[in-house]
């Protein structure tokens, strides 16, 4: 990724005090710890806009523009503005320039988001022409948006007349999005805590919007808010990468800024909160979790402490470390006191240090605790804080943390620039110097001093200053009890607002506006005004990743494959061991995930679980036991990465390999306490997965009936897995026994591989900047190329025979999740289209056309769902469609079933093809992190030559190919039909039941 080096500082134009295209250079700083990048800060002389350029030899260039958008109500104004801004602008007057550009560019990232007090619009791309195109569309969108009334109605909120039920309904993309967000008890809890901690600041309001208040926002207010806030005088720009800032500076100055005069009334940094005289103690109710009874799920409780001002960057960084030392990992004091002790299964939402607000805060609390235990819990928290301040933090843990911090800087990330830009922003909007944030070494040196001189008490003094009992009057204690009727009360409130709106509304007028909007949504629009990268701008070849050299190892009867590339001194290693799952009973398959996630956390014969985690943090970048499902197999992937500089015998790398072998050879398979605790935590966290990933759960369940591979996917990560996992709480012994059983399978897989013909079962993707490949071989091979032999018994201590079949997968299944007010729908079918074929490529094009020309229009724009998409899995040939936060899942399902018929009569244009192809090239050419290079070949057996062939097929593909594959897919649809599934509300279930669907209730009372 780091290729071209731009020597910006040699250019005399950019020296402090000089003016470049209307921008005055304010400062230039070199940051050695971040790959030696140069940070240039500029200010626009006439308008006062701020600009930060991070000059790095990285081809993945970033642009972002950010405005302060503080709010004083919950009507969601900045969020709805963020959506409508992207619905057409002066130069690009089309309905959806943003979504269209996703397909007309080679971007590696495009997005926009509303934070607590600002709104940010970033993109990244590796192509210079594309950068110009996107820059033009982004800046036109934010500075000259059309903000038409109809876009406001579509994205914000509107009243509609539902002919099928003869009643009014409220719709709108943001309205529905926030309804989904507000179903989540953890989000509600965190929002309330924020409001109570920071009254009379912008953070006391929900910038995303409360669905009960969104309907009060008017179009006029939206337009006025835009004019005031989206102004150059209120803008902060960041660019990053190898292109240099000059063209962007010139473009803004010459093309955008002439339309503006300096504005003095732009918002200043959000104010700090006025400190409380005494603590607040509050209670609230929230939605009940699905899958468990109210008494079982316990309560959420937390105490937040006001800490320093965000402008105090040093103290804020130190507080992040304090939070991490108190709370992270099984060796932390709060984990031991609250979670390991069994007082609570998990920490509360928001637990930890939050630096995104002007006045920062640290939160300590628990989720899923019994209310009767809260007195004890508060005592334990206070006691733990007193002890941490008195005895000080364990220097070994502080050292491990420094190691982790330094390592995270050395790691090459796929979107490094974008991460930097988003990390800086919360500080920059609070008037900190963004460069201070980048100087990480200064901070780790301070930490190192604190460890070397224990009397400095750098970290402990912060505990004393903010967290000890009775020292900080500005605290809020918040208790949230689950309420099974919460969702229905919420619906009642919404209905009240709907009734008010309906009474005031003129039905004919509503229908007229609605029809106007519908006909506008159905209009085919000409988007030729939007810039588009041409296929000629795309490199005709793929980047070759595959191994440069390999060598046989006698010990493992296998080939070790190396991928030689720059990794900043980190070696990445993985070894795979395939297991045939065809004869493994379902009940064991459902335990696969628990095995891979629990095994490395049990501790070993020589390290207790908390010692092991400190040892790993001090030595490794990461150590993992993972699994990968392909066809009817699972492959265990044993992975490790660590620094490999220095000599092998005292290297982190050797220690890491020893730790991995320890985990595999002598895990503590009798650690019942740890397993019980991990199960409790898991049961606390799993229910929220249902609302977070409803569409993929629906898709996975619907697909389970297609093939054994799909069934295994469902059993290891679908709703069947979640329901099974929720039942394991009382039975840690069974879980341990299953872990032992799986470890046996892992060991057998290794033995199998040793006996079988030589195959490549290990790979080191590596290249040290300090040692050559031969040296690396010498160092890595002895570390990992030996078999492991467990010193624990591998015979499972289960007496009973496992039932082989426990779940049956139904078609037309509707899962009711009690708290849900929206739906997630999925339909999927199997095809016989092989990876290595033109039809596979054509199917990928087809699903893109379906998503953008059919589903986006009918399911999102007209149906009011937050999202929808069609997908084709090139590896197993399954074809499907799904919707996300959908007000009407059944309607979407019938649209899914009509998708192919629609496509066949649709006129596929050259532009449709180009857009689909560009999107596919985006994926193929996206920057790859070192640890993933070559993994497609290694784990999936897809060679660089195959990828190259695919790229050529994509280029040559024509409309006939799409129609041909549509015929072929329709043949499958007619023969086998589509398997469908919905996750949704009790109300939706009634409708589905009337249409013959099988309804399954996920709440605790029902049969599991
Ligand atoms: Zn949104």
Image: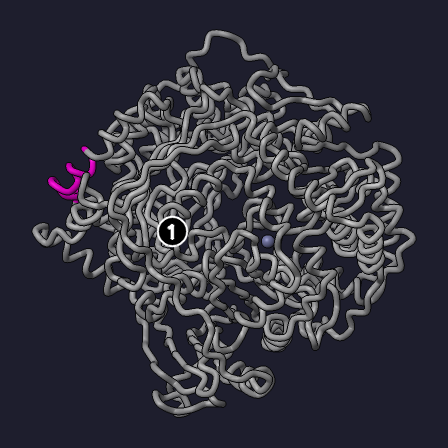
Q: Viewed as shown, does residue 153 lie left or right of 52?
A: right
Indicate the colouring scheme: one colour
Residue tagged 1:
199
In this view, 486 is above or below 899: above
Identity of the residue furthest to the front in this view: 504
Q: Residue at x 81, y 43 (%)?
A: 895
Identified at 58% across, 60% down, the residue is 111
Seen at 61% across and 33% down, the residue is 820
Q: Nearer the viewer, residue 68 or 535?
A: 68
Image: magenta residue range: 383-394
**Horizontal side of residue 871 vs 396, given as left or right:** right
Query: Does residue 633 appear in the picture of this structure?
Result: no
Q: Is residue 115 above or below residue 696?
A: below
Q: Considering depth in this image, is 528 or 37 the residue closer to the camera?
A: 528
User: Is the stretch drawn in magenta largely helix, strand or loop?
Assistant: helix
Q: Would you say 167 lies left or right of 200 here?
A: right
């Amino acid at each position: 990724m780091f290729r071209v080096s731009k020597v910006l500082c040699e250019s005399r134009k950019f020296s402090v005090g000089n003016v470049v295209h209307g921008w005055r250079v304010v400062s230039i700083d070199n940051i050695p710890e971040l790959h030696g990048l140069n940070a240039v800060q500029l200010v626009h002389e006439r308008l006062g806009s701020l600009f930060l350029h991070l000059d790095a030899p990285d081809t993945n260039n970033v642009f972002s523009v950010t405005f302060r958008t503080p709010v004083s109500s919950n009507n969601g104004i900045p969020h709805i503005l963020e959506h409508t801004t992207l619905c057409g602008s002066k130069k690009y007057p089309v309905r959806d320039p943003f979504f269209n550009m996703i397909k007309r560019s080679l971007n590696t990232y495009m997005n926009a988001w509303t934070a607590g007090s600002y709104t940010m619009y970033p993109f990244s791309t590796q192509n210079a022409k594309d950068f110009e195109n996107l820059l033009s569309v982004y800046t036109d969108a934010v500075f000259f948006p059309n903000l038409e009334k109809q876009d406001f109605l579509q994205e914000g909120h509107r009243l509609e007349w539902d002919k099928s039920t003869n009643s009014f309904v409220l719709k709108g993309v943001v309205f529905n999005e926030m309804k989904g967000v507000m179903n989540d008890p953890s989000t509600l809890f965190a929002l309330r805590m924020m409001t109570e901690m920071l009254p009379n600041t912008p953070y006391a309001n929900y910038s995303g919007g409360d669905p009960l208040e969104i309907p009060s926002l008017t179009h006029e207010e939206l337009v006025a808010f835009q004019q005031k806030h989206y102004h150059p005088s209120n803008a902060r720009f960041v660019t990053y990468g190898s292109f240099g800032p000059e063209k962007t500076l010139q473009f803004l100055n010459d093309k955008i800024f002439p339309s503006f005069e300096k504005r003095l009334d732009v918002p200043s940094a959000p104010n700090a909160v006025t400190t409380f005289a005494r603590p607040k103690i509050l209670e609230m109710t929230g939605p009940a979790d699905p899958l468990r009874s109210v008494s079982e799920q316990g309560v959420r409780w937390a105490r937040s402490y006001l800490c320093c001002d965000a402008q105090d960057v040093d103290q804020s960084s130190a507080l992040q470390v304090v939070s991490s030392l108190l709370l992270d990992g099984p060796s932390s004091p709060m984990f031991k006191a609250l979670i390991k002790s069994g007082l609570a299964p998990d920490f509360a939402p928001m637990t930890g240090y939050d630096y995104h607000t002007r006045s920062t805060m640290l939160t300590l609390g628990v989720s899923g605790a019994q209310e009767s235990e809260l007195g004890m819990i508060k005592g334990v928290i206070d006691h733990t804080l007193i002890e941490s301040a008195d005895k000080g933090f364990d220097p070994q843990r502080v050292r491990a943390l420094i190691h982790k911090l330094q390592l995270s800087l050395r790691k090459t990330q796929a979107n490094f620039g974008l991460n930097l830009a988003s990390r800086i922003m919360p500080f920059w909007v609070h008037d900190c110097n963004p460069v201070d944030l980048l100087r990480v070494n200064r901070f780790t040196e301070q930490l190192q001093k604190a460890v070397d001189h224990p009397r400095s008490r750098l970290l402990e003094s912060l505990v004393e200053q903010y967290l000890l009992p009775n020292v900080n009057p500005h605290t809020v204690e918040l208790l949230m009890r689950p309420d099974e009727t919460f969702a229905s009360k919420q619906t009642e409130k919404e209905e009240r607002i709907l009734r008010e709106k309906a009474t005031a509304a003129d039905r004919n007028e509503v229908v007229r506006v609605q029809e106007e909007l519908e006909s506008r949504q159905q209009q085919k629009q000409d988007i030729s005004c939007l810039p588009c990268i041409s296929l000629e701008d795309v490199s005709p070849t793929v980047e070759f990743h595959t191994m440069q050299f390999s060598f046989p190892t006698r010990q493992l009867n296998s080939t070790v494959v190396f991928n030689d590339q720059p990794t900043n001194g980190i070696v990445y290693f993985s070894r795979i061991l395939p297991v045939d799952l065809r004869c493994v009973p379902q009940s064991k398959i459902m335990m696969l995930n628990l095995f891979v996630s629990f095994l490395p956390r049990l501790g070993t014969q020589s390290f207790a679980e908390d010692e092991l985690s400190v040892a790993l943090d001090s030595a490794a970048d990461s150590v993992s036991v993972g699994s990968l499902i392909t066809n009817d197999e699972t492959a265990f992937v044993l992975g490790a990465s660590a620094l490999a500089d220095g000599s092998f015998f005292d290297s982190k790398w050797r220690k890491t390999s020893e730790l991995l072998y320890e985990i595999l050879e002598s895990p503590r398979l009798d650690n019942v306490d740890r397993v019980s605790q991990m199960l409790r935590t898991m049961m606390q966290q799993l229910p929220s997965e249902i609302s977070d990933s409803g569409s993929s759960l629906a898709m996975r369940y619907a697909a389970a009936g297609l093939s054994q591979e799909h069934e295994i996917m469902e059993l290891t990560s679908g709703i069947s897995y979640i329901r099974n996992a929720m039942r394991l709480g009382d039975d840690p012994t069974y879980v341990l026994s299953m872990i032992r059983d799986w470890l046996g399978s892992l060991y057998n897989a290794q033995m199998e591989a040793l006996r079988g013909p030589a195959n490549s079962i290990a790979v080191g993707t590596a290249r040290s900047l300090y040692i050559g490949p031969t040296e690396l071989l010498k160092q890595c091979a002895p570390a990992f190329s030996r078999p492991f032999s467990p010193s624990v018994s591998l015979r499972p201590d289960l007496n009973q025979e496992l039932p082989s079949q426990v779940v049956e997968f139904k078609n037309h299944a509707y899962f009711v999740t009690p708290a849900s007010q929206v739906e997630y729908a999925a339909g999927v079918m199997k095809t016989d289209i092989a990876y290595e074929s033109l039809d596979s490529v054509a199917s990928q094009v087809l699903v893109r056309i379906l998503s953008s020309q059919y589903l986006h229009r009918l399911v999102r724009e007209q149906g009011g769902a937050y999202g929808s998409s069609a997908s084709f899995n090139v590896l197993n040939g399954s074809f499907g469609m799904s919707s996300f936060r959908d007000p009407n899942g059944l309607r979407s399902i019938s649209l899914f079933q009509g998708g192919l018929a629609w496509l066949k009569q649709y006129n596929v244009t050259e532009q449709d093809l180009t857009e689909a192809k560009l999107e596919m090239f985006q994926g193929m050419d996206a920057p790859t992190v070192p640890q993933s290079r070559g993994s497609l070949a290694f784990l999936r057996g897809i060679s660089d030559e195959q990828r190259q062939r695919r790229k050529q097929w994509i280029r040559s593909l024509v409309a006939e190919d799409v129609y041909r594959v549509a015929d072929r897919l329709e043949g499958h649809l007619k023969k086998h039909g589509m398997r469908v599934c919905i996750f949704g509300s009790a109300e939706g279930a009634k409708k589905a039941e009337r249409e013959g669907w099988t309804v399954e209730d996920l709440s605790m009372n029902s049969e599991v």
